[in-house]
């Protein structure tokens, strides 16, 4: 029967007229709950999918947040930089030289007190000990490991003047300017930023060297300061409270750390 | 809308502004004019530094770290080298016709920055724009890099040995048919080698040629004194200076010295004040500085000077018994009565010169013919100036050489079979009638030694790369005659050799290194060959006590130079402008000189001092002349002269002489390189080449040329003059307001002001003893005391208060503002407070500071198209304002940098805090934080912020990567190189501040008061810029801030800028001031 849907609400007290089950063509007018209505047309999502969508949205949202968090943490200086240890052209071991032999940092990195760069030493410095065999075949007493193939690059560089291409480990972006002499002369030890280099066979970056990390010290340098005679001492431990020692140095050297942008960003 | 008249002239920046064209209004309304935000067109023709970098390197995300860097130390480090620490070496460069004593900063073995040698008496630390660009020339990838021989149309790379062999075969035993064409040089070593060359090859001939020569000056001296003396102006001893077509302060080999000396005679704070008159056709730097400037056609200056001499003679007679010379009476003639004004000028100038006989000076420029120079020498002699304000010294070298005309003649006769050209570019700039390009092509064997494979190199069979001045040993005599030595700062980058090395090789001298050659010459001169003395010489850069003594000159009879008794028919009395003929004057360029610097982008983009035109040249025409010729700004003017014609775009320059058209040389180069234009490479030329018009008879002045306006398509003129317009309260008040932005006053007004407000000022003490308008003699000069508490009522050195109380400043301003208060919490600056002062009385607008800043701070070059849109990147710009009549205006210049305001409007609007204030008062810029909103630039009232619209450091695909590696040597590693999308501005050279502070802390000592010197301050020849700690009362900048002339630009905005300007003081003669009764002044004679 072709009864039209009466959209007017039934009057009070009157029985609700029965809703037709099918329309004129025999197709069902209401969902049966499984998406199919018998005629094959008008797909509708089953009701239970509403909850699935909600849960799915939640899962996608969490995944996105998770992804963002992973990306953030993965690209943080703490993650990316700490532990970075590139392979060097020759296997120079700080553990041997600075650790076992107890060479002072400044023997090789000798410009650190008067320049912004703690320069990688020229091959000449290596040649002080590793000069190799002389032209006439004699080996000078001071020439250590004169035949070692690991030192071939050094000997070649000394002979030809070609430079050794070391890979930079502690690298700041080009728009940040760091000055070693300003720190080394004012109570900041090598180990504070570079870690226990005297225990590294291959140098790795021990600290993130991010701006936040630098600012931590610039905002309060006292716990990180040490007397000037202990700058290169990797294993220095203060006898007293380090903050107290730091405060003394702070006062003695009249340290005023700057947190202006132009201090590092020129 | 006419700029309203204020109490101190009405100012205007351009004729458009004065006419208030709709284009100008729109320009002002939008900081970036029409379509600036549109994508640029013509990308294929862009200059090589502005190609937009494509961020092709998407790269992999492996590691998420930036590129791996290697550290490559030297295998053997020299003893005095600390990596990263700069070293400074003294040297000398022959630049723009003169020897400049320099101190070059070298970092890790490469020269980076040029400064003046502070110990050398010629410069005392000042430089000019050309020397500052020398490092760019050194690292120019367009420089020739190999010895090349052309055979049957093909170029072959050869070696130096092969060239020497070839030359030996050509020259034979006696050099028959050999000609050398060189540029004039003061180098004693080269002269020595020339003599040896002529001895070795007796039949060889030596010629010299340069585009902007001073032949007339030399001939004039010979005419006047009989011998080829060299002049030495003593501008600091002169009270009255009169320049006739002369530009000693701007375009002169000795301009650095003369600018400094001139300013020394203008020490207002100590009561010294000279007076400068300029009579010229073109508006020069001297004209900008002048107290009185008279525009006069160059050809009329001859008769003008003759009339001056007549008057001077007459007045000398009348005042023999100590009377004061009579001044003309009555008011100054109206601006429209041109001839009467000229006559008045003559009368007053003559009186002034005579009144200060012995302290006056008449100078004539190189464009004027020799007899005009001789006349000036006679006037100076009559006035007793010789030996006092001008002296002469004898060069102990005989450097007479043949002219290029003689060479062309000889070549035409077939006498020349081998031509060796040493530097210069004669094919480009030889006199047009010689057709020198063809002359060279017709010579069978020709060789060119030069920095670039330019027009001359292309005509020659051999090309030989020249070692740059910074790569070679050499020597020179400075303008004052001091023996100055040049040492190389880097080995030749391109297998080049210097002139002296090449000559030594050709002669077969046993010494072939430049060092040995120079040492040998010097040992012969000084008689002291010791190592110690040589090292001393090289260290200092010059030989002390080598300044030649003043020669005792005698004036010749000069009977042919008559003094006219009656000048009623004199040429200078003609003031009407003919429409069918004009007078053309050929001018050197402030940017590319004679064209040799056409490939230096810094100089191409440097705005011309007066016209502010970049990347091109223009025909300079005065407004009245333009009206007569019916030509307007930007239109093409066809100038026909000597059978040739060129079309040049017109620039209306107020103050050009009537009926004169100025044509600027040095443009239209066809083989300059990627920047200056190259036909071979398909790079369009910059500007128009006017050399085809120039013949020897009209070398500087062409009185009869034809000029017509044509409708051909004119090259656009990229000017910077209307950019960064400081938009103050409405356009209506702009004329009045400019008078507050750049302040000036007269010396008499200043002294009256001091008498009223600062009665104890040292300037009054000195001036009282001497008649007004003159300089005080040495005994009376009192230096300004460090503490001058009684001199002013209110110490403004600390900027803690901002409440509108200001001590009296000169000139007094009509516009007073109510007491200022700030919405922001005021910060008080204990410790260091960086500030700067710029003395407008000393600034000549020479542009040296602009190039110095560009070199020091890696400021990019943007190219012509971008300059047209107002996007030039100069951190420091020099504004130029005209005032007065459009035919006889005055000009004042003002350098503007970031003022590092304490209440900076830019800092308040940055959304990401990329620009913040340091606790020392600097406005810091963190480039990596900037996201390119450009709100800060919008907010800056001085319009000093610059935005990197493109990645100007990007690799240009037309060049090989190797060239990028070369040009990156030029960058200063102490300053960040900025990328696209980042704002930048003057930082007060923060890298220098930081390095000085670190050095002081490292050494455990306090900073000296003048220890930190900014790049612009260091480059300035007149020391107009002072920089330092305002919290130290003894520093020069703190003293300058306390000066009664000191004012801050736009101080009523309460942004508290750290830069103050010192008002410019002019010293006009009371009888030449418009609108005042002449000689009736009650306060001086």
Image: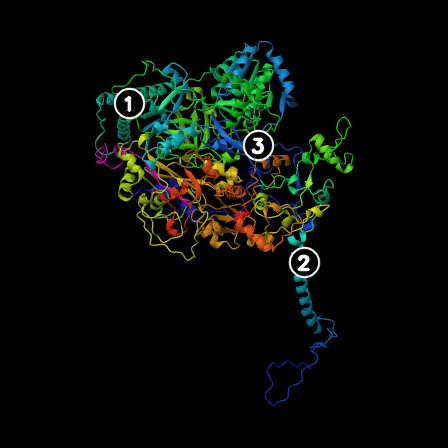
Crowd rating for badge 2 (residues with CA inside 10 Å; few <14, some 14–19, many 20+): few
Depth check: give the residue in front, B188 or B885: B188
Residue at disc 3, secondary structure: loop
Q: Residue furthest front?
A: A239
Which mark lies nearer to you, 2 or 1? 2
Q: CA distance from mark 2 to mark 3?
A: 47 Å
**How many residues crowd around disc 3 within 10 Å: few (fewer than 14), some, or many (20 or more)?**
many
Residue B391 is situated, as x and y percent measured from the top left of the image, at: 37, 21
Write down the residue under mark 3: B140
The colouring scheme, among rainbow, by chain, secondary structure or one colour, is rainbow
Above-or-below relation of B852 to B398: below
What is the C-alpha distance between the residues marked 1 and 3?
51 Å
Tag on residue A70?
A: 2
Quadrant holding the C terminus of chain B: top left
Q: Which residues are magenta?
A: B1059-1085
Note whether residue B709 is visible. yes
């Amino acid at each position: 029967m072709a009864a039209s849907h009466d959209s007017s609400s039934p009057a009070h007290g009157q029985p609700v007229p029965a809703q037709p089950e099918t329309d004129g063509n025999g197709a069902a007018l209401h969902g049966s709950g499984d998406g199919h209505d018998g005629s094959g047309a008008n797909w509708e999502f089953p009701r239970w999918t509403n909850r699935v969508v909600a849960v799915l949205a939640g899962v996608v949202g969490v995944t996105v947040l998770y992804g963002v968090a992973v990306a953030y943490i993965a690209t943080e200086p703490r993650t990316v930089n700490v532990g970075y240890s590139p392979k060097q052209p020759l296997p120079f071991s700080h553990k041997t030289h600075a650790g076992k032999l107890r060479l002072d940092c400044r023997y090789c990195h000798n410009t650190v007190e008067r320049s912004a760069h703690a320069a990688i030493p020229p091959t000449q410095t290596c040649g002080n000990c590793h000069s190799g065999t002389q032209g006439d075949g004699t080996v000078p007493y001071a020439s250590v490991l004169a035949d070692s193939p690991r030192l071939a690059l050094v000997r070649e560089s000394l002979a030809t003047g070609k430079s050794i291409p070391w890979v930079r480990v502690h690298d700041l972006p080009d728009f940040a300017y760091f000055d070693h002499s300003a720190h080394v002369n004012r109570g900041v030890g090598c180990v504070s930023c570079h870690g226990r280099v005297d225990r590294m066979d291959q140098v790795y970056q021990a600290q993130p060297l991010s701006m936040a990390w630098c600012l931590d010290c610039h905002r309060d340098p006292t716990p990180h300061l040490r007397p000037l005679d202990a700058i290169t001492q990797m294993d220095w431990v203060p006898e007293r409270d380090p903050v107290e020692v730091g405060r003394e140095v702070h006062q003695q050297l009249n340290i005023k750390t700057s947190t202006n942008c132009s201090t590092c960003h020129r | 809308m006419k700029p309203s008249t204020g109490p101190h002239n009405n100012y205007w920046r351009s004729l458009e502004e004065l006419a208030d064209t709709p284009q100008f209004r729109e320009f002002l309304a939008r900081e970036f004019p029409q379509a600036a935000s549109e994508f640029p067109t013509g990308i294929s023709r862009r200059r090589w530094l502005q190609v937009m970098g494509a961020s092709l390197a998407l790269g992999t995300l492996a590691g998420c770290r930036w590129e791996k860097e290697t550290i490559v130390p030297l295998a053997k480090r020299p003893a005095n080298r600390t990596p990263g620490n700069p070293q400074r070496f003294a040297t000398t460069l022959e630049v723009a016709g003169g020897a400049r004593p320099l101190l070059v900063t070298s970092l890790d073995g490469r020269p980076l920055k040029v400064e003046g040698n502070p110990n050398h008496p010629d410069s005392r630390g000042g430089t000019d724009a050309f020397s500052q660009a020398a490092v760019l020339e050194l690292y120019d990838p367009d420089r020739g890099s190999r010895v090349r021989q052309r055979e049957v149309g093909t170029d072959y790379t050869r070696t130096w040995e092969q060239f020497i062999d070839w030359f030996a075969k050509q020259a034979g035993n006696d050099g028959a048919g050999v000609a050398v064409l060189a540029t004039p040089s003061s180098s004693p070593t080269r002269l020595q080698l020339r003599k040896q060359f002529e001895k070795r090859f007796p039949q060889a001939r030596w010629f010299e040629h340069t585009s902007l020569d001073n032949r007339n000056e030399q001939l004039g001296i010979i005419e006047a004194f009989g011998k080829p003396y060299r002049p030495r102006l003593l501008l600091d001893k002169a009270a009255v200076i009169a320049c006739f077509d002369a530009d000693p302060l701007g375009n002169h080999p000795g301009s650095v010295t003369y600018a400094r000396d001139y300013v020394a005679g203008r020490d207002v704070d100590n009561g010294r004040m000279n007076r400068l008159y300029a009579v010229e056709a073109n508006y020069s730097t001297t004209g900008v500085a002048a107290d009185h400037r008279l525009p006069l056609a160059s050809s009329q200056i001859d008769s003008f000077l003759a009339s001056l001499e007549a008057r001077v003679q007459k007045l000398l007679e009348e005042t023999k018994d100590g009377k004061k010379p009579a001044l003309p009476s009555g008011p100054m003639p109206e601006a429209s009565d041109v001839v009467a004004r000229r006559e008045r000028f003559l009368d007053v100038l003559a009186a002034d010169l005579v009144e200060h006989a012995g302290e006056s000076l008449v100078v004539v420029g190189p464009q004027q013919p020799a007899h005009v120079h001789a006349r000036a020498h006679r006037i100076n002699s009559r006035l007793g100036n010789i030996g006092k304000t001008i002296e002469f010294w004898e060069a102990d070298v005989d450097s007479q050489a043949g002219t290029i005309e003689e060479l062309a003649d000889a070549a035409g006769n077939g006498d020349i079979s081998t031509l060796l050209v040493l530097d210069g570019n004669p094919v480009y700039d030889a006199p047009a009638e010689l057709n020198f390009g063809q002359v060279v092509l017709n010579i069978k064997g020709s060789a060119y030694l030069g920095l670039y494979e330019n027009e001359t190199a292309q005509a020659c069979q051999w090309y030989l790369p020249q070692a740059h001045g910074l790569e070679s040993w050499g020597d020179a005599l400075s303008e004052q005659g001091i023996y100055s030595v040049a040492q190389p700062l880097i080995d030749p980058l391109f297998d080049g050799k210097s002139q002296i090395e090449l000559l030594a090789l050709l002669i077969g001298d046993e010494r072939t290194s430049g060092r040995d050659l120079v040492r040998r010459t010097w040992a012969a001169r000084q008689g002291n060959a010791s190592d110690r003395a040589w090292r001393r010489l090289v260290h200092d850069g010059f030989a002390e006590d080598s300044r030649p003594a003043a020669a005792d000159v005698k004036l010749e009879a000069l009977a042919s130079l008559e003094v006219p008794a009656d000048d009623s028919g004199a040429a200078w009395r003609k003031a009407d402008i003919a429409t069918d003929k004009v007078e053309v004057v050929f001018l050197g360029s402030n940017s590319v000189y004679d064209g040799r610097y056409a490939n230096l982008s810094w100089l191409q983009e440097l705005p011309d001092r007066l016209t502010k035109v970049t990347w091109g040249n223009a025909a300079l025409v005065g407004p009245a002349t333009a009206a007569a010729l019916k030509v307007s700004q930007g239109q093409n003017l066809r100038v026909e002269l000597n059978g040739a014609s060129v079309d040049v775009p017109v620039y209306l320059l107020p103050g050009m002489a009537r009926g004169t058209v100025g044509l600027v040389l040095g443009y239209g180069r066809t083989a300059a390189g990627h920047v200056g234009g190259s036909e071979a490479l398909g790079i369009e030329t910059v500007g128009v080449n006017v050399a085809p018009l120039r013949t020897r008879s009209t070398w500087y002045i062409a009185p009869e040329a034809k000029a017509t306006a044509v409708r051909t398509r004119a090259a656009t003129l990229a000017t910077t003059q209307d950019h960064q317009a400081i938009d103050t309260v409405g356009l209506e008040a702009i004329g009045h307001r400019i008078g507050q932005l750049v302040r000036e006053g007269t010396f008499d007004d200043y002294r009256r002001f001091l008498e009223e407000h600062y009665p104890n000022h040292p300037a009054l003490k000195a001036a009282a003893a001497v008649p007004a308008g003159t300089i005080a003699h040495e005994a009376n000069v009192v230096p300004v005391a460090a503490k001058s508490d009684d001199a002013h009522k209110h110490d403004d050195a600390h900027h803690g208060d901002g409440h509108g109380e200001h001590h009296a400043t000169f000139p007094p301003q009509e516009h007073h503002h109510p007491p200022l208060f700030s919405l922001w919490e005021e910060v008080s600056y204990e410790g260091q407070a960086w500030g700067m002062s710029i003395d407008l009385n000393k600034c000549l607008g020479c542009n040296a500071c602009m190039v110095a800043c560009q070199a020091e701070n890696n400021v990019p070059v943007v190219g012509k198209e971008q300059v047209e849109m107002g996007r030039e990147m100069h951190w420091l710009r020099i504004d130029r304002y005209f005032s007065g009549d459009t035919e006889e205006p005055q000009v004042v210049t003002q350098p503007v940098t970031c003022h590092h305001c304490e209440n900076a409007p830019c800092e308040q609007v940055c959304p990401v805090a990329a620009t913040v204030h340091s606790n020392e008062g600097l406005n810091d810029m963190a480039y990596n934080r900037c996201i390119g909103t450009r709100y800060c630039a919008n907010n800056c009232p001085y319009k000093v912020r610059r935005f990197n619209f493109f990645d100007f450091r990007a690799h240009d695909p037309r060049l090989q990567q190797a060239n990028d590696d070369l040009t990156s040597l030029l960058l200063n590693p102490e300053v960040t190189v900025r990328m696209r999308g980042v704002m930048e501005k003057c930082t007060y050279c923060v890298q220098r501040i930081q390095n000085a502070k670190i050095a002081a802390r490292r050494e455990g000592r306090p900073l000296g008061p003048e220890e930190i010197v900014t790049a612009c301050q260091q480059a300035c020849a007149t020391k107009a810029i002072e920089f330092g700690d305002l919290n130290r009362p003894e520093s020069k900048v703190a003293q300058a801030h306390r000066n009664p002339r000191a004012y801050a630009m736009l101080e009523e905005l309460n942004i508290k800028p750290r830069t103050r300007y010192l008002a410019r003081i002019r010293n006009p003669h009371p009888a030449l001031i418009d609108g005042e009764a002449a000689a009736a002044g009650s306060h001086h004679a």
